[in-house]
Amino acid sequence: MFCHHCGVQVSEGHRFCVACGAAVAAAPIAAGQRLQQVLPAAPENRYERHRQTLGFLWMAMAVLRLIEAGALFLFSRFDLGAFQIPFIPRFGLSQLFFGFSSLLVLAALASFIAGYGLIERQTWARPLAIVLAILSLFKIPLGTALGVFTLWVLLPTQSEPAQQHLPHNV
């Protein structure tokens, strides 16, 4: 007989497991039966439970950043001569908005790459997502929420070894 709790072989007549102390079930487990069928599955770690969700959220953030970049780019095409901001020349305001929209496109590209890497279990995706999470903490409210969630999933010390033992594509 084998213990249903820990899988250790228990002698006939014992009512409790000598290893874990669990009560031995009335129906004995055959010696040839696979132990994986008897033991409950090991719980997944936090990284594996949330890896795919985190990847899709970073891809969604990339789409939102592209929408922001498009809106800012369209706004930079308007004649902004009516708006006079001190210390910024009239012609420089459009270029400033165009520059910010270009940065948003780069941030969207980085977010998409990080999301794809997390979904595909790439080893380089974890540090990229951590850097993006720290930068997005200042983008209230969605960036802050995604940044906190990302750091919660990826920063614990258990996440890195768990990620390195997962099969991944190189």
Image (spheres, helix red, strand yellow):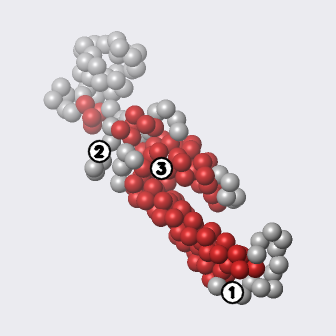
Left or right for 76, reference 114? right
What crowding class fits label 3: few (fewer than 14 Cα within 10 Å), some (14-19), or many (20 or more)?
some
User: Could you tell whether 25 is left or right of 28 in the image?
Assistant: right
Depicted 32 relative to depicted 23: above or below: below
Q: Earlier in the sequence, mark 1 or mark 2?
A: 1
Question: Dots 3 and 2: beta carbons under 8 Å?
Answer: no
Quarter of the figure that contains the N terminus = top left
**Is 65 on the left or on the right of 7, as rendered?**
right
Residue picked out by circle 1: 78
Residue highlighted by disc 3: 128
- Image coordinates for residue 56, horizontal then vertical, percent: 47, 60
Q: Nearer the viewer, residue 85 or 66?
A: 85
**As shown in the figure, which amino acid type bears the numbered disc 3?**
Leu
Of residues 132 and 74, which is closer to you in this image?
74
Report helix, strand or loop for mark 1.
loop
How far from the left and from the top, in percent, is residue 11? 25, 13
Above or below: residue 145 compared with residue 59? above
On the image, numbered disc 2 is attached to which residue?
167
Query: Disc number at residue 148?
Result: none
First in sequence: mark 3 vs mark 2: 3
Q: Position of residue 107 (x, y in %)?
A: 54, 62
